[in-house]
Amino acid sequence: MLNWGLHSVGRKCRHKERETTNVQFSSRVLTTLLFCAMASFAAAPAFSQAQNLSARTSAAELERDRRLKWFREARFGLMIHWGLYAVPAGEWKGKLIPGLGEWIMNRARIPISEYEQLALQFNPVKFDADAWVRMARDAGMKYIVITSKHHDGFAMYGSKASKYNIVDATPFRRDVMKELAAACHKYGLKLCFYYSQTQDWHEPDAVGNDWDFTPESKKNFARYLEEKVKPQVTEILTNYGPIGLIWFDTPRNITKEQSQELVDLVHKLQPDCLVSGRVGHGLGDYDSAGDNQISVGQVKRDWETPVTMNDTWGFKRDDQNWKPTNILIQQLVQVSSRGGNYLLNVGPTSEGLIPQPSVERLTEVGKWLKLNSEAVYGAGPSPFPYELPWGLLTTKSGKVFLHVFKWPSKALIIYGLKSKVRRAYLLSNKERLKFTQQADEPMDHYALKIELPASAPDKNDSVIVLELQGETRADTSLLQQPDRSVTLPAFLSEAHKVGDQGLRLDSRGVVERWLNKDEWLDWDFKVSQSGAFDVVLLSSEQKYGRDWEGGHTVEIEVAGQKARGQVDNNGKQENPANPYWKYVISKIGRVTIDKPGLYHLTLKPETIRAEKKLGLTLVSVELRPVQN
Ligand code: FHN
């Protein structure tokens, strides 16, 4: 029997909205509007991105909407980092070079004259464009983004603008992009090009090479832009048929005018071609999250995240740290459930082969997608602004898809879904599932209990479909979960800042730059089951565990009680959405909540350690039920 003892509570709209990359806390007004709108979530086909259309009037925005149509439906793309760096494959002169495979020239400070010699060894005789594109199609991917030129400056297509290219400088002499364009056309995928517009370690006036050339300050970046970038961007948009998007990257030292010139050039040559957010200055058609970063909450703009399958983009022989398939599927679903696109990378060898572990994973993802595609393509965001302890949700008109990553043994209980459920079944085989629903409107408490088979039908993600009467209606306030836990994510807090600077959210929804003890956060949440709770604070390491700062003292106040404690490392926890940033667990104290109702929790630092300039990097505050 479910617990119903919940006081009737009013709803407040006070969560924070955030953007993707280069994010900052957005204005309070916008925040309030967004979450008030969300508070009575009603799902509709094609979702908010399309609904926003009517509100936007300018011709440029309409044009952008038109261009983005395919991108919004695609959800899943293949990124390919392929270039001369596949020859050394992470090793230079007998030494393993740490870092990303495609950065070997920079990391080992290889002189141009030596790096150029790699072209003579680049002979990918096993390259088969048809097989690559078929593999992507079978994985369920809708577009391919391949490096036409990465930071090393080598063009992977036949370029007239620079002899330093695969046709003129390698024994292979084939224009692989022509072959890929033909295969993409055959299988109905969009061909897209990555192009490094600022870093080019082969060019004296471009950004990045300070071992062969003069310091950055003496460079004539504009000349490089006119003489190499614009001619090459023109080539890739002229010689390979329709291109889905140009994936510019690392917009360092580029002015707003120069970024705009590139955007205009792309749109002039191919009005349907999208420009990635990394063209710089927010001028892209859509936002790009940081590498391997999955944005949280409901993201305002169209967005995409690039993700590695191991720890490198370009092939590196010694990198065998492959992400398991279930994590890749979870990430794809996480991104889809937040209205984004998941761009999953492979790094082919210098022979032209995609590493077997990548092929295997893509095959498995494809198998899963074949059975569950309805819950991904064209699916809209979750009605809840946070993840649930067992997984997450995507939606379509009149349907909710429950993606169950952690299969509970007998039943799945969900709080907060207000719509009446007509049918529940497993998406993969249509097996019907029994369910009961309880709604206590005066108490504002809604519970759905679905009876489940004893074991998970799919080890990666078992999808349950709920067919609803009418559209999706949900309580979007922060709710205690049926396992009695309460999670208060930083990105759904109200931030009380001192001035405009100070703490802000990064693109994963983690608070950064919290160095001032006078800044604090608070949350409202609903409790339906009373009891004693351990107060736990999750903070985040920097990427690859490089650093973390602890030793801060904080005070948490909730239900008339205060818990004071220190942010210490009491263990770590991984988050599949952002596996390179481990979460650090700090136990702050214990509180008792003696009756159901609406509660308010404040988190105020007493001292913040900031020697490393990291400060308190908050992920969430959790109330974990004390087990008797
Ligand atoms: O420096 C590059 C890196 O090599 C790789 O291409 C990634 C892919 O997103 N982008 C840059 C770093 O953000």
Image (spheres, rainbow, N blue to C red):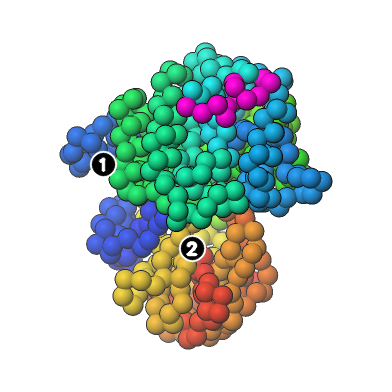
Residue 510: image tag: 2
- Dot 1 alpha-carbon crowd within 10 angstroms: few under 14, some 14 to 19, many 20 or more: few
In magenta segment, residue 164:
yes
Residue 219 image position (x, y, % from top left)? 45, 50
Whether residue 341 is visible, yes or no, is: no
- Dot 2 alpha-carbon crowd within 10 angstroms: few under 14, some 14 to 19, many 20 or more: many
Left or right: residue 461 compared with residue 435:
right
Query: What residue lies at 35% left-to-right and 31% top-to-bottom?
Result: 266
Above or below — where is 378 with respect to 2? above
Q: Secondary structure at mark 2?
A: loop
Whether residue 39 is visible, yes or no, is: yes
* Callout 2: CB less than 8 Å from ligand 1: no
Query: What residue lies at 62% left-to-right and 61% top-to-bottom?
Result: 582
In magenta segment, residue 78:
no
Kindly report which numbered mark, 2 or 1, lies closer to the viewer in this rendering: 2
Give the dominant element type of the magenta stretch: helix, strand or loop: loop
> What's the residue type where badge 2 is placed?
Val
